[in-house]
């Protein structure tokens, strides 16, 4: 029916699928300056847990799911509003052995199956639940692949945000800029929607700034450039 396609409003509850890359690279230290400091995955887990807590405290109707990116995409926790279950699931994540190259065709197939976008919504306020995939990607050595723009990206109630956590650009054999360009070119939003696509290497202040921006409700936020202009400049990389 037409309701299934109705646009979300700033009051729409969100169902947020946390899509976490568990590639082995994320077991490396967050900062090369601290080889025995926290791993990238540990920092990502901490950041996601804080994000979930703050979103849940803002609106009890928000729901969260967790999906893992290895060689393929696996739904690890279906949507739930059980906050402790979500936090325990995030806390339990660990890396797996997988290839560097990642296929986003399969990713969109999997999450498309998980999002009940085409089912007629329940009567009342929840009709406009907004679905957001928050992708945390961590591979520095191979540009991902996609063969066709997924129709999901153009659905009025679906938003995709990406946080690309990578090695420093100067390291040998990295294709971080090409991968970031891939996200900007292939996964950006159209139809008046916004997509927040961020990248960070080793800088905690920058990571925290991005996480703060991702808290904003997609139906009422500025586009990424306007939002960034309002914030003070934060250094791109850790020293």
Image (cartoon, rainbow, N blue to C red):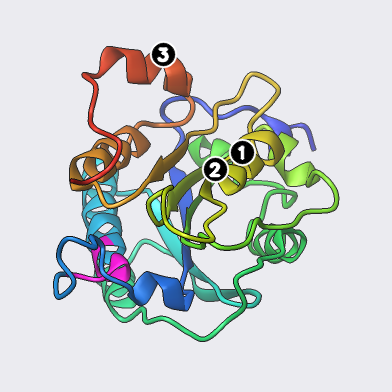
Front residue of this view, candidates 8 and 34? 34
Of circles 3 and 2, the one toward us is 2
- Counting every numbered tag in the picture gives 3
Numbered disc 3: secondary structure = helix
Is 89 situated above or below 237?
Answer: below
Please tell me which residue is depicted at 46% across the width and 50% down the height of the picture: 164
- Residue receiving disc 2: 177
Is residue 80 visible in the rendered image? The answer is yes
The x and y percentages for residue 139 are: 51, 63
**Residue drawn 72% across the image and 52% down it:** 119
Mark 2 secondary-structure assignment: helix
Mark-to-mark CA distance, 3 and 1: 19 Å
**Residue 201: % across, % down:** 34, 49
Few, some or many residues within 10 Å of mark 3 (<14, 14–19, 20+): few
In three-dimensional space, the C-alpha distance between marks 2 and 1, rounded to whole angstroms, equals: 6 Å
At x 62%, y 77%, the residue is 99
Residue 146 horizontal side relative to residue 91, left or right: right
Residue 197: x percent and y percent? 49, 37
Closer to us: 122 or 134: 134
Q: Which residue is mark 1?
A: 181
Going from N to C along the chain, the mark reached first, 3 or 1, is: 1
Classed neighbour count for the residue bearing mark 1: other residues with Cα under 10 Å, few (<14), some (14–19), many (≥20): some
82 or 165: nearer the viewer: 165
In the image, the segment drawn in magenta is 38-43
Point out the image quarter for the N terminus: top right
The answer to the question of whether label 3 and label 1 lie on touching residues, with beta carbons closer than 8 A, is: no
Residue named by callout 3? 226
Can you say whether 45 is above or below 233 in the image? below
CB atoms of marks 2 and 1 within 8 Å: yes
* Nearest to viewer (mark 2 / mark 1): 2
């Amino acid at each position: 029916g037409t309701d299934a396609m109705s646009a979300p409003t700033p009051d729409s509850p969100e169902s947020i699928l946390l899509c976490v890359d568990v590639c082995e690279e994320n077991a490396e230290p967050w900062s090369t300056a601290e080889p025995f400091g926290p791993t990238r995955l540990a920092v990502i887990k901490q950041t996601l847990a804080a994000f979930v807590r703050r979103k849940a405290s803002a609106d009890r109707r928000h729901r969260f799911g967790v999906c893992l990116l290895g060689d393929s995409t696996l739904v690890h926790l279906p949507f739930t509003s059980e906050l402790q279950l979500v936090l325990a699931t995030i806390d339990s994540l660990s890396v797996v052995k997988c290839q560097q190259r990642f296929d986003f065709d399969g990713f969109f197939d999997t999450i498309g199956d998980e999002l009940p976008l085409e089912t007629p919504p329940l009567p009342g306020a929840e009709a406009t639940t907004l679905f957001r995939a928050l992708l945390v990607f961590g591979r520095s050595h191979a540009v991902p692949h996609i063969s066709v723009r997924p129709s999901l990206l153009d659905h009025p109630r679906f938003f995709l945000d990406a946080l690309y956590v990578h090695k420093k650009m100067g390291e040998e054999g990295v294709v971080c800029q090409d991968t970031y360009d891939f996200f900007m070119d292939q996964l950006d939003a159209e139809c008046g929607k916004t997509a927040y696509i961020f990248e960070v290497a080793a800088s905690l202040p920058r990571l925290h700034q991005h996480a703060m921006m991702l808290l904003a409700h997609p139906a009422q936020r500025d586009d990424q450039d306007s939002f960034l202009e309002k914030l003070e400049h934060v250094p791109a990389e850790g020293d």
